[in-house]
Image (cartoon, helix red, strand yellow):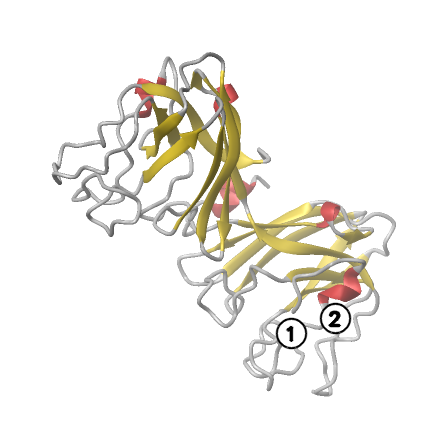
């Protein structure tokens, strides 16, 4: 089943992934986690179960965002309230842990994960937020705690695989774009906002020492040249250009200010609270472009609605894309 078809009709949100291939144990492959308009979370993917026994295996979110040196570092099942006891995912609180997602079936060495749960959350402000935790798959079937034992974890046995639930990362690769700029900017969700980090240089001396405007532009196109990227990205039509520390509508969503070049190179290190990696949200920058300009961004001191910061020509541009590409 194609995942893009599976997710059609669902509310687009910050995407998360949990990659067992980068974790511990014998399970390989990754699952995708995405919020829905109903407030539930869909967990989906096809995993390689290796030589583990066929049949049902407990599948749980565990409390610790740790999987090193092995899956025991993930701690116990995730509880958002200490009164919760273990149960099946359809049980009503407190008769389940937040992380109790039931079982997945190993059929001929493949585990097709297709879970929708209304309790776990990808909202960072929610007590049920799972974005910094781990998923653990167990050797046995989760029995749902039929005796309602407060100490039960479902009798699911050993931990045969684990992974960290992490937000999907993005990159903007100037080498695959247009212009004289070279280098890659990594774009990630952090506790403080969306971070942009990377080392940039140039194919000639046009990337002069000093300050250069650095903006997200509205169109995800950089060919035949950087003009194809359109204007600065606005989350709402009433925004005018400004410095990144201005509040909306006194800045465009894409107004990330300037970067500094010294000795022909620039170390980008920007964190911004306004831009978003939530696909489909008002300030979503995914599948848009970054443009670097020849001059400093002046921040529009006259508050001119038509200003774009007087940053001059476009030296280089790139597309903001998922990394690694799926």
Above or below 267: residue 22: below
Within 10 angstroms of label 2, few (less than 14), some, or many (20 or more) residues? many
Q: Residue at x 28, y 26 (%)?
A: 230
* Residue 119 image label: none
Name the quarter where the N terminus is drawn: top right
Name the quarter where the C terminus is drawn: top right
Q: Residue at x 41, y 62 (%)?
A: 38
Foreground residue among 29 and 201: 201
Above or below 135: residue 3: above
Foreground residue among 288 and 253: 253
In the visual, does 2 lie left or right of 215?
right
In the rendered image, is residue 237 in sight? yes
In the rendered image, is residue 220 in sight? no
Which residue carries the number 2 mark? 142
Q: Residue at x 30, y 43 (%)?
A: 253
Which residue carries the number 1 mark? 88
Expressed as whole percent of the image width and height from the top left, the position of residue 321 reads 49, 33
Expressed as whole percent of the image width and height from the top left, the position of residue 227 reads 30, 19
Which secondary structure, mark 2? loop
Expressed as whole percent of the image width and height from the top left, the position of residue 160 reads 81, 58
Label 2 vs 1, first from the N-terminus: 1
In the visual, does 270 lie left or right of 88?
left
Which secondary structure, mark 1? loop
- How many numbered marks are there? 2
The image quadrant that residue 115 belongs to is bottom right
Foreground residue among 46 and 252: 252
Structural distance between the alpha carbons of marks 2 and 1: 8 Å
Within 10 angstroms of label 1, few (less than 14), some, or many (20 or more) residues? many
In the visual, does 178 lie left or right of 63?
left
Expressed as whole percent of the image width and height from the top left, the position of residue 257 reads 33, 38
Contact between marks 2 and 1 (CB within 8 A): the answer is yes
């Amino acid at each position: 089943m194609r995942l893009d078809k599976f997710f059609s009709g669902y509310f687009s949100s910050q995407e998360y992934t949990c990659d067992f291939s980068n974790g511990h144990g014998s399970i390989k492959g990754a699952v995708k986690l995405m919020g829905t308009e109903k407030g539930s979370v869909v967990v989906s993917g096809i995993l390689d179960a290796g030589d583990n026994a066929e049949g049902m295996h407990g599948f749980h979110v565990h409390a610790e965002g740790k999987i090193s040196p092995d899956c025991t570092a993930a701690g116990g099942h995730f509880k958002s309230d200490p009164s919760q006891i273990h149960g099946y995912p359809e049980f009503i609180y407190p008769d389940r842990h937040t992380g109790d997602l039931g079982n997945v079936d190993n059929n001929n060495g493949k585990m097709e994960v297709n879970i929708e749960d209304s309790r776990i959350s990808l909202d960072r402000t929610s007590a049920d937020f799972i974005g910094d935790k781990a998923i653990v798959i167990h050797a046995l079937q989760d029995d749902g705690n039929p005796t309602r034992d407060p100490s039960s974890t479902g009798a699911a046995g050993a931990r045969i695989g684990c992974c960290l639930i992490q937000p999907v990362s993005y990159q903007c690769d100037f080498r695959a774009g247009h212009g004289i700029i070279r280098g890659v900017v990594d774009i990630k969700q952090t506790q403080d906002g969306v971070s942009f980090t990377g080392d940039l240089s140039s194919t000639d001396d046009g990337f002069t020492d000093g300050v250069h405007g650095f903006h997200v532009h509205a169109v995800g196109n950089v060919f035949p040249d950087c003009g194809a990227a359109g204007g600065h990205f606005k989350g709402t039509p009433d925004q005018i250009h400004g410095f990144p520390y201005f509040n909306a509508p006194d800045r465009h969503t894409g107004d990330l200010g300037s970067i500094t070049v010294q000795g022909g190179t620039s170390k980008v290190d920007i964190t911004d609270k306004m831009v978003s990696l939530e696909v489909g949200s008002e300030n979503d920058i995914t599948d848009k472009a970054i443009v670097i300009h020849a001059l400093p961004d002046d921040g529009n001191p006259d508050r001119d609605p038509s200003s774009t910061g007087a940053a001059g020509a476009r030296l280089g541009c790139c597309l903001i894309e998922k990394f690694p590409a799926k």
